[in-house]
Amino acid sequence: MKSISQYLKKTNNMKFQDILPRIVNNPGFRSLKEIKQAGYRIVKERPACRDGYGAGRDGDRYFLAKKEDLKPLLVRLGDVAEVRRGITTGANEFFYLETQSNNSVQKGFLYVKNSAGWEGLIEENFLKPVIKSPREINSIKVKPNELKHKIFMCHKSKSELKGTHALKYIIWGESKGFNKRPTCRVRTRWWDLGKRESGTSVWIYIVRDRMFSPFNPQKFILDCNLFEIYNKVDSLLLAYALNTSVTIFFWEISARSYGGGGGPLKSQIYEVKDFIVPNPNILILIKNPKYQESFFERKVKNIFTELGINPNLPIREQTPNPLPDRKALDDIVFDILGLTEEERNEVYWAVCELVKNRLEKARSV
């Protein structure tokens, strides 16, 4: 993987006083001794290559960096996070319920309905919010008021549940044979899905043209058509890294079309672990990114709108015009990677071309 040290190399041929005025991020150090005592080293920006690729500048700038800052710029997702499949209930008709309006419901209970036709009261402490489908998520940050379903989560035995509505519901489920389904019958208690805590980020198993990784700081439970991403690094920085256009580019070229004929893009867990993403740790150098709140809270658009490209016109004849908050985040990553303006446009063009070609192929099959 590329590292900052490949873009910024140690300086050793110039006198310190010549270098000092060119240090971009110097907080006020006046001597080499002060810099070393503070734990920094001086690194030089790598000049642009002859073919125009590389850092994109003439390499006359210097930076102060600590050892921990000299990290790979791009990493495998599996190196910075653990990826797991969401929960498999074995009987969605039993475990997933929707809250119904009922003014007579007393505190501590919810009036709910499942897709098998049952409706009634269940104790609220046995019903947890669940993300059943990515269609329920409108913004990058998951909002609890947008989640339509509750999941029945009960870890108690029947004797412990005596006199509860939850027990009545379990008995009803047995009358419908849910307890005999393959996934349910191997459990010690067929209704007990086990204690579960989700990750802070979500990877969508199958996508079309709305490509993003939901940020799940409240750790709502996920259905098995979503993947739980347990962070090994700062959860917010991981959410940023997973939603950059660079990540979407690698996602598009690394996954495969659903059914092999284009259209939706599908990713298996082992593939997601190998996806390349910007190293979240390098984003720690950026304090309070611009448009932070807007980026996580606003409605996610399709990728063409996000990147400001009209898919009905020749893509490479357009100048990409990303939404302001997306551009602010992308520019942070592009700057760290040292991409030129043309290379940045190339990322946007390539993503839109790949998505457009995939969708058009599906329509033609």
Image (cartoon, rainbow, N blue to C red):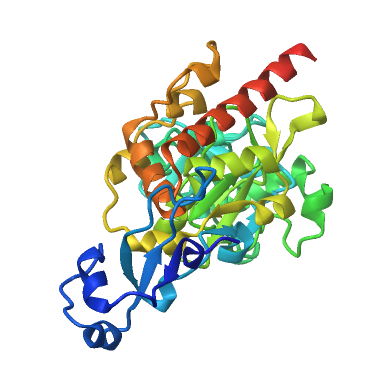
Can residue 214 be seen in the rendering of this structure?
Answer: yes
Which of 299/302 is in front? 302
**Snapshot quadrant of residue 247:** top right
Residue at figure coordinates x 44%, y 52% from the top left: 55
Residue 295: % across, % down: 35, 40
Residue at figure coordinates x 70%, y 24% from the top left: 263
Q: Relative to 89, is 36 above or below?
A: below
| Quadrant showing the C terminus | top right
Residue 273: % across, % down: 66, 56
Residue at figure coordinates x 80%, y 30% from the top left: 259
Q: Judge left or right: residue 133 versus residue 214.
A: right
Residue 219: % across, % down: 48, 55
Can residue 165 be seen in the rendering of this structure?
Answer: no
Residue 303: % across, % down: 51, 28
| Quadrant showing the N terminus | bottom right
Residue at figure coordinates x 58%, y 39% from the top left: 249
Which of 71/267 is in front? 71
Which of 72/211 is in front? 72
Q: Judge left or right: residue 67 versus residue 64.
A: right
**Snapshot quadrant of residue 230:** bottom right
Q: Relative to 5, is 146 above or below?
A: above
Q: Judge left or right: residue 349 versus residue 285.
A: right
Q: How many marks?
A: 0
